[in-house]
Image: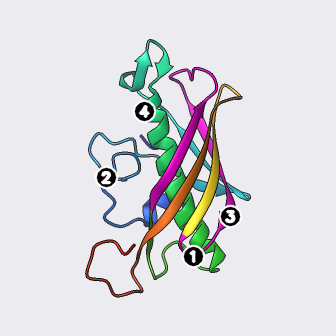
Amino acid sequence: MLSKKLSNIFQDYMPDNICFGCGKNTKNGLHIKSYWNGKEAECIWFPKPYHQGWSSIMNGGIIATIIDCHCMGTAMAYAYKKENRSLNSLPEYRYATGTITVKYIAPTPNKKVKLSAKIISYSEKKIFLKCHLISENKITVSAEVVAFRVYDSGKETKKTFAI
């Protein structure tokens, strides 16, 4: 489900990403697409009928997943931006969720949504973000997310992820 056609989609620069939410080639995945819109990262996403929890209401687990994946992509893109380099440059970074706190403010219709994430604080190993899910011009979900850098291709490690 491509949510937007742009040349600088964060997930396009995540090689070998098999994630259900943001892996661009994952069969039956959510295929979110995040990009910069000024200082915030956005994602427009179109759910399918099987993404419902109750009739016409988006499933809360799907909501948490798209927020999580949008924020991990945003963390990676921000780290590159902070280092003044392009998304296709090396070293490659990968981020994983440290914590995610999701507040469901109102039921979210199972229709087009917009995710908007901003960086609150940054360090080399940890990024704190806030994210809103907007449906029909209303914030229906708010989240706080901590992303940890778990991989840096510029550092030798014997493990897949360096913590």
* Left or right, 3 with reference to 161: right
For badge 3, the amino acid type reads Ser
Let me know if residue 123 is in the magenta part. yes
Q: CA–CA distance between discs 4 and 3?
A: 26 Å
Residue 49 seen from this side: yes
Tell me where residue 30 sits by quadrant. Answer: top left
As drawn, the label of residue 160 is none
Tell me where residue 108 sits by quadrant. Answer: top right
Residue 94 spot, x, y in % from top left? 43, 68
For badge 4, the amino acid type reads Gly
Residue on which disc 4 sits: 61
Secondary structure, mark 1, is loop
Residue 72 spot, x, y in % from top left? 50, 57
Q: Which residue reaches farthest right?
A: 38
* Left or right, 17 with reference to 47: left
Residue on which disc 2 sits: 25
- Residue shown at 55%/42% (left/top)? 101
Residue on which disc 3 sits: 121
Q: CA–CA distance between discs 2 and 1?
A: 29 Å
- Pick whichever, 163 or 43, lies toward us: 163
Residue on which disc 1 sits: 124
- Residue shown at 26%/82% (left/top)? 158
Let me know if residue 122 is in the magenta part. yes
Label whose residue precedes the other's in the sequence (4 or 3): 4
For badge 1, the amino acid type reads Glu
> Where does the magenta region start and end?
96-125
Label whose residue precedes the other's in the sequence (2 or 3): 2
